[in-house]
Amino acid sequence: MDFKIISALLGIIMLAMSVIAIYHKKMIVAVIATGAVGLFASIMYLFLAAPDVAMTEAAIGSGLSTIIFFYVLNRIRSNDKEGRESDEIDEVIK
Amino acid sequence: MKKLFVFIILIALASMLYPLLDTFHGNDKLSELAQFYAQKDNVTKVNSQNLVTAVVVTYRGLDTLGEVTILFLAAAIIAFFLKTESEKRTLRKNSEIFKTAAKMLVPIITMVGIYIFINGHLTPGGGFQGGAVIASGVILMLLAFPNMEFSHKFFESLESVSGLVYVGLAALGAIIGLGFLDNAILPLGKFGELFSAGAIPVIYSFVGLKVGAELSNILNKFKSVQAEN
């Protein structure tokens, strides 16, 4: 029973984080929310008796991919400042 | 009109997925395939305490080879498109606390990663997990000291040598053992000890080194493109 409550809570948090990741206007918050989804998913995997998958998800899903997103975001922004294609990128982001 | 179509698609998806929820019930015993892997004969044949690793490295070893190939392709494509230039810029200085913490944590993180892939046949985890943990230690180092230069040559040669040894050991199993990726080419040892399960720990250690080097290379490429701006 406890297990069910905890997994339901984890699922609700994951859903909320995914909604934030899609709809938040600030990209940084969206990227961090994506990382948080991975973190809670790894806890979920641990509860579902898959510790090896949980390790992979924690290291790659919430660690490395978040940092790669930040690198890419930084790169896009510095292109933005030069005025190249800034309108197009804004449209894509919106 | 558009909303109507979205609504129709949602209803269709719901009616497709509802039977999954309706007929779901948990398993009270292993499935047929899992029973085949977990039977006594097969466990003594591979002699690995962590049966998941035995399945991943020997029974389904070709899948693992495919995954490693996909990761190699991704790293190669990233290296092809993100060309590094030797232009440097002065980056913002990090705080002293962050630098010191990174210096203290990186050796510990690397050691945990190595532990995970060396003990892959005894405890949960293995090559991919250990490699990812090592790569997260490398990214901490890259974030704390952005001006530090990593040796591309070292990582690239480590990756190629690990890949070659992995495929070589697998082919050796086909030549002197029972088949491709057979683990009985090395002595099987005693169940539950570090030197057991034949070639599994050796193969998984090289997979771990390869994955760690590849992920570190990818991250380093992304970082060096930042510095170019």
Image (cartoon, coloured by chain):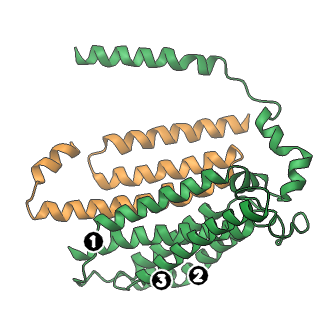
Chain colours: A orange, B green
Secondary structure type for disc 3 = helix
Q: What residue type is labelled 3?
A: Phe
- Rendering quarter of residue B39: top right
Q: What residue type is labelled 2?
A: Pro
**Residue placed under numbered mark 1 in the picture:** B83
Q: Are marks 1 and 3 on the same chain?
A: yes
Compare marks 2 and 1 and give the one earlier in the sequence.
Answer: 1
Secondary structure type for disc 1 = loop
> How far separated are the C-alphas under marks 1 and 3?
18 Å
Q: What residue type is labelled 1?
A: Lys
Viewer-proximal residue among B158 and A19: B158
Asked if residue A44 lies left or right of residue B225, the reply is right
**Residue placed under numbered mark 3 in the picture:** B154
In the picture as drawn, the residue positioned furthest to the left comes out as A83
Compare marks 2 and 3 and give the one earlier in the sequence.
Answer: 2
Quadrant where the N terminus of chain B is found in the figure: top left
The residue that appears at 47% across and 62% down in the rendered structure is B72
> How far separated are the C-alphas under marks 2 and 3?
18 Å
Residue B222 lies, in percent from the top left, at 34, 68
- Rendering quarter of residue B202: bottom right
Tell which tag, 2 or 1, sits nearer the viewer: 1
Mark 1 neighbour class, 10 Å CA radius: few under 14, some 14 to 19, many 20 or more: few
**Residue placed under numbered mark 2 in the picture:** B107
Compare marks 1 and 3 and give the one earlier in the sequence.
Answer: 1
